[in-house]
Amino acid sequence: MTALSDHKTIGKLFLTASVVFLVVGAGLALLMESKAVGPASYSQLFTVHGLTMVFLFLLPAWLGLASAVAPLQVGARRVAFPRAHAFCLWLYVAGGAMVVAGPFASDIASGWTLSSPVPVGRGFRGDGPDLIVLGLALVAVAGTGTAVNLLATLLQFRAPELALRRVPLFSWATLVSSAVLMLALPVLVGAFVMLFVERHFGGQVFSGDEGGNPLLWPRLFWFAAYPVLWALVVAALGAMCEIVPVFARRPLASYARATAALGALGVVAFVGWGSEVADGAGARLLFVFGALAALAPVASILLNLLLTLRPGRAPADGTPAPSLGSVPALAALGAVTVLAAGLLGGLVLALDAGGTSHTTTWSVAAQHLLYFGAPTVGVLAAAHFWAPKLWGRHLHDGVGKLSLAAVVGGLHLSFLPLYVLGVDGAPAHEPAEGPAALTAAADLGSLVLALGVLLFAANLLTSAVAGWGRRADADPWGGHTLEWATTSPPPPHNFDTLPALTSPTPLLDRPPVPELEAAST
Amino acid sequence: MTTAITDDVEVAEVAPRPPSRVPVGERALSLGTMLVMAADLVVLGAIVAAYLAVKQGVADWPPDRVVVGTYIPTVVTVTAALSSFSAQWALYAARRNDPRNVATGLALTTFFGLAMFLAELQALDVDFGVSSHPYGTFYFLLLGYHLAHLVAVLPILGLVAGRALAGHFPPGRVDAIRASGILWHATTVIWYVVVTVLFLLSRHA
């Protein structure tokens, strides 16, 4: 228990466990792509694959990275509630195991939203649905608890002179996404409680002879799920705002605009999208504006990152600076391309509220690129960037580049053809039909993507977790933020001494070396 | 100011500061409690939203045969209001560094909470069940939700009261008392929501 009071250990365990579940999710995807399973098994695999990728991989991966890195960035010695932090980790692991075990107990094929159909009634007897419902509820409680812990840490344990307007952007993104998760995940908990009562005590909420409302489940689910998905995008954007400037060797083009955009995205996360459950012209109009309001900050941050990509000054200590060809930088730029592709698709969806694009593969492509693709590539970027700090080991460069190419290439190859198929009216959530070349490209993309994430998982587990990777210095990238001012890996108390904190990038504020400055110009 | 030597260039590093500047999070517990209770109220919000959505689709709400009465809800509501005063009394006493009054206020709050718990158990004795109709489902869900909070919070209040009496909270270190006050106030807020939804907004109450 002593070791598990350290936020870095807990964060690393969150990340490691999420990568293990990623392997499960990717394995299920490969099984689905193999076409070796019948339609019933395919639906089951699809259900568990979707749930695994969102709730057991993306959500805990970002919570783990935030748990490990954000306290370091703000000069905290620990998180606010270390024991609760460890408790949330075990809740998540137990919940994840229950979700994965669900289909082995009995059939459940309701899709990752558990809404087609809602698992109540005679068709859903057995322990499988219960395991999934209880498992997801545990994961949601763990996510809420971790978000609360991170919020309390960032608000109460920051270094005294580090005002909120000066916190590093990943910490700011953590603050925003934690607030969103804290307000969104409990809705899922409430929904799961009602579902459980309905399944076991004969409650009449989502169905029933005397007036349960079957439309209620998708509304509750999406009310929570959209903000959760946006929270993951916020976290990914925050990480990209940290990584790109380091490798561009200059501060972010506009820190103020980035904080404003991330904050705005956190607020509009609750109104952006949701056209699937909007009835009537008024509600659709609201969602048009909500969606546009959510896309605007994303576009603003992408522009901010592109403006940052200009030649910078030489590092102050004279060590050779890492280039934009390094894996974390390439991954961050890969995430930019995925986000840009998702943004364009999302823009069409926003302007076409209630239109056909929402029922075709166009919406599948846009949502996957925006909500799943960008945060996934973001995890790759963040893991490559911070693994040297957290484990004291670099991930393998060659394998990293290969996995990155497979993941980014696989995402584009999978979903860009779906845009074209969507224009031709191919319906969403059905086996893609259309020109053979396009469907073959999409299938190949899924395969490449699954292989890419498996490569990444193997790289992280062997290079960092098993400790086979190249040993890392305290500051291998010439980082700008506080976590790079301590050893790799940091001691349990994080810092022996804190440097002066006059900006979000205290290490960049070191005075430049005149000789090197002259040489670089 | 410390320096480091790299090759032939002497580089100035950032000035180290003494560890005393490390933040200690004096109000972390009360802030954490506030955030947890905010999340908790969102769970309640989801259930209430479901209640309103289901109620909207049912013409006869609650069903004619359902009589829930007003006596017990009124007693619990008045007790909840009284308990808020006693909890606040404890908080004010904590600020004045008066452990005896802290313990008295919290003990009184625990007593009121226990009275609410027993009264709510009586309210569960009705002639319908969870599966009888949607109103029955929400009746037991919402009452159960508040009862679960009482079960969780009352031991905490008792524990904090005992520790206050034993002098475990020195002057200026009253965050645990503040947190227990927040916990209790949120629990009473949940009751006010439950009583409004189940009894005030229902036709036969």
Image: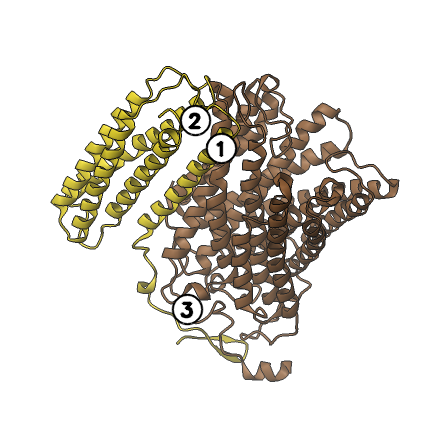
Q: Is residue A192 left or right of residue B159?
A: right
Examine the rendered structure and indicate whether residue B16 appears above or below residue A367. below
Describe the element under mark 3 as helix, strand or loop: loop
In the picture, the quarter occupied by the C terminus of chain B is top left
Q: CA distance from mark 3 to mark 2?
A: 55 Å
- Residue B138: mark in rendering: 2
**Colour chain B is painted in:** yellow
Q: Is there CB contact under 8 Å for labels 3 and 2? A: no
Examine the rendered structure and indicate whether residue B138 appears above or below residue A57. above
Describe the element under mark 2 as helix, strand or loop: helix
Local crowd at mark 2 within 10 Å, few (<14), some, or many (≥20)? many
Position of residue A401 measured from the top left corner of the image (x, y, whole percent): 70, 54
Q: Is residue A336 left or right of residue B117?
A: right
Would you say residue A242 is visible in this rendering? yes
Position of residue B108 measured from the top left corner of the image (x, y, whole percent): 17, 36
Q: Is there CB contact under 8 Å for labels 1 and 2? A: yes
User: Do the residues marked 3 and 2 share a common chain?
Assistant: no
User: Please, what is the three-letter code of the amino acid marked with disc 2?
Assistant: Phe
Q: CA distance from mark 1 to mark 3?
A: 51 Å
User: Please, what is the three-letter code of the amino acid marked with disc 1?
Assistant: Ala
Q: Earlier in the sequence, mark 1 or mark 2?
A: 1
Local crowd at mark 1 within 10 Å, few (<14), some, or many (≥20)? many
Which residue sits at x=56%, y=18%? A126
**Colour chain A is painted in:** brown
Q: Which residue is mark 3?
A: A499
Mark 3 or 2: the one toward you: 2
When asked about the image quadrant of residue A240, the answer is bottom right
